[in-house]
Image (tube, rainbow, N blue to C red):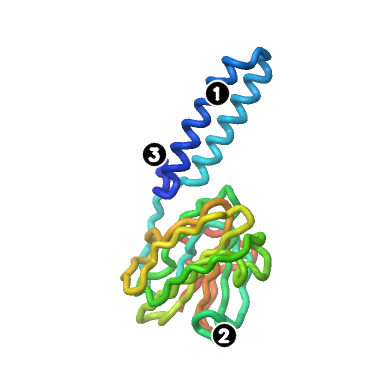
Amino acid sequence: MIRFHKEGYKIISITFIFSISIILLVERFFDAILAIKITQILTLVFMVLILQFFRNPKRNTILNDNQIIASVDGKVVVIEEVEETEFFKDKRIQVSIFMSPINVHVTRYAMSGEIKYSKYHPGKYLVAWHPKASTENERTTVVIENNSFGKILYRQIAGALAKRIVNYAKVGDTVLQGTDAGFIKFGSRVDVFLPIGTKINVKLGEKVVGGVKVIAEK
C-alpha cells in the first residue's frame, strides 16, 4: 500500500478536488473530443505527479551509532573538506545529496542522538546544486550529538522550486536514526557535515536511498 507524507495531505486533497472538477467541466464546456481527452489526460498526469512527490515509503533502517545514513533519496553531488561557518566554525567533511522533483522528499535523521541546535534561515531560491545554495538559500540547520560521532550537522536547503521546508527537530529532543525529521517541498538538497577523519562510503554521482544507505562510518 502506498503511504503519503502528512505534509502532503492538504495539497493532495486540493489537487484531487481540482483534478476531478477539471475532468468533469471539460466534458460540459468542450465540444471537441480530442481536446477533452488531452485535457483530462494532462490533469490525471498532474495528479499522479503530486501523489508520487508526497509518497512516504517505509524504510527499514538498521540502527547503528557508528554509522551515518543518507537523510534523503537522491544523488551525491558534493564530497569535500570545507569550513563550516554557522555552528562548528572549523573544518568538516561535507556530503551533499541533491533531490530531483521525482525523488522521495522525506528527510530522515542520519543518526540517533540529542538535538543540540535547530535554526531556520530565510533566503534565496537558487538552484539546489549552486555552490552558494548552502549559505544563501532558504534552509534549516540541525545539529545532532551522540557518543560515537559527537556532533554532526545537517542542513535542509530549498531549491529553485522548493517553497517550504518542514523541520521537526527541536533542541533537547532525543531522536532515532532513520525516523522522520521533516520534508522539503518541490526540489531541494541536504548537506551533512561530518568530523574530519570520518570514513566516507559513497562516491560523487552515486544514487542513495534515504534511511537505508550508509554514507559514512567510524
Which label's residue is closer to the chain start, 1 or 2? 1
Q: In this view, does 173 lie above or below 102?
A: below
Task: Indicate the position of residue 146 as horizontal and vertical percent values.
Answer: 36, 78
Residue in the foreground of this view, choosing between 54 and 218: 54
Q: Secondary structure beneath disc 3?
A: loop
Which label's residue is closer to the chain start, 3 or 1? 3
Task: Indicate the position of residue 156 as horizontal and vertical percent values.
Answer: 52, 64
Q: Secondary structure beneath disc 1?
A: helix
Q: Residue 91 carries which label?
A: 2
Q: Residue 82 occupies which quadrant of the picture?
A: bottom right
Q: In this view, does 123 lie above or below 3?
A: below
Task: Indicate the position of residue 56 as horizontal and vertical percent values.
Answer: 43, 48
Residue in the foreground of this view, choosing between 59 and 181: 181
Which label's residue is closer to the chain start, 3 or 2? 3
Which dot, 1 or 2, sits closer to the camera? 1
Q: Mark 3 points at which residue?
A: 1
Q: Mark 1 points at which residue?
A: 23
Quadrant where the image shows the N terminus = top left
Using the numbered discs, state the Cα–Cα distance from disc 3 to disc 2 in whole angstroms.
44 Å
Q: Residue 151 occupies which quadrant of the picture?
A: bottom left
Residue in the foreground of this view, choosing between 169 and 114: 169
Name the residue: 46% across, 39% down.
12
Using the numbered discs, state the Cα–Cα distance from disc 3 to disc 1 in whole angstroms.
26 Å
Tag 3 and tag 2, C-beta contact below 8 Å? no
Q: What residue type is labelled 2?
A: Lys
Which dot, 3 or 1, sits closer to the camera? 1
Q: Which amino acid does label 3 sit on?
A: Met
Task: Judge the density around disc 2: few (<14), some (14-19), many (≥20) Cα neighbours within 10 Å.
Answer: some
Q: Is residue 80 left or right of residue 144?
A: right
